[in-house]
């Protein structure tokens, strides 16, 4: 399935939150294709190992320094191919029945966030930010 959205998650010492967020995306999002890129900002906890162990198929970028949120998002977006980017905080959980697909519907009031164009390697994508 071609990705409709590239999901970007920036992690810094948020191992358990990140795993919970990623698990909820996989559990509740089945209708739309997606890819996930996690940028780990040089965490000192077990974030990298836990993500690799539980989600071997996601793109995990391990930074050797804390890039901060904006630079980490820019790094992850440079790998994006889909027409939408979703910035997902590690403490976000996609709830049962509230699939990510619903949140991507531009005119749906369920989605709280903003949209603007963002440069990716395939041109421009609409950027969506999940607010939890």
Image: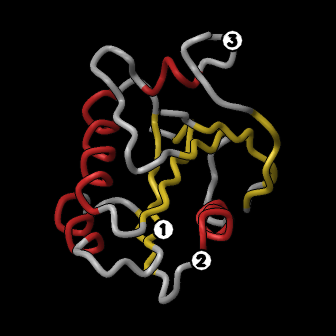
32 left or right of 80 in image: left
Report which quarter residue 127 is drawn in.
top right
Chain-order first, disc 3 or disc 1: 1
Which residue appears at 25% of the width and 43% of the height? 23
Image x and y of residue 49, in percent: 22, 74
Chain-order first, disc 2 or disc 3: 2
| Residue on which the image places disc 1 | 39
Q: Nearer the viewer, mark 2 or mark 3?
A: 2
Q: Secondary structure at mark 2?
A: loop
Nearest the eye: 31 or 132: 132
Image x and y of residue 82, in percent: 62, 45
| Residue on which the image places disc 3 | 107
Which residue appears at 63% of the width and 52% of the height? 81
Nearest the eye: 115 or 70: 70
Q: Is residue 91 above or below residue 70?
A: above
Q: Secondary structure at mark 1?
A: strand
Circles 2 and 3, Cβ within 8 Å, touching? The answer is: no
Q: CA distance from mark 2 to mark 1?
A: 9 Å
Image x and y of residue 26, in percent: 29, 38
Which quadrant: the N terminus? top left
Q: Is residue 18 above or below residue 110?
A: below
């Amino acid at each position: 399935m071609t990705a409709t959205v590239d999901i970007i998650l920036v992690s810094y010492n948020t191992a358990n939150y990140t795993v919970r967020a990623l698990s909820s995306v996989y559990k509740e999002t089945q209708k739309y294709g997606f890819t996930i890129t996690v940028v780990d900002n040089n965490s000192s906890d077990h974030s990298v190992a836990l993500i690799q162990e539980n989600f071997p198929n996601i793109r995990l970028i391990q930074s050797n320094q804390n890039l901060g949120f904006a630079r980490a998002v820019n790094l992850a977006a440079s790998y994006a191919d889909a027409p939408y980017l979703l910035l997902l905080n590690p403490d976000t959980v996609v709830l049962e029945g509230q699939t990510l697909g619903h949140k991507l519907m531009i005119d749906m009031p369920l989605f709280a966030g903003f949209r603007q164009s963002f440069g990716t390697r395939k041109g421009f994508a609409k950027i969506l930010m999940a607010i939890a």
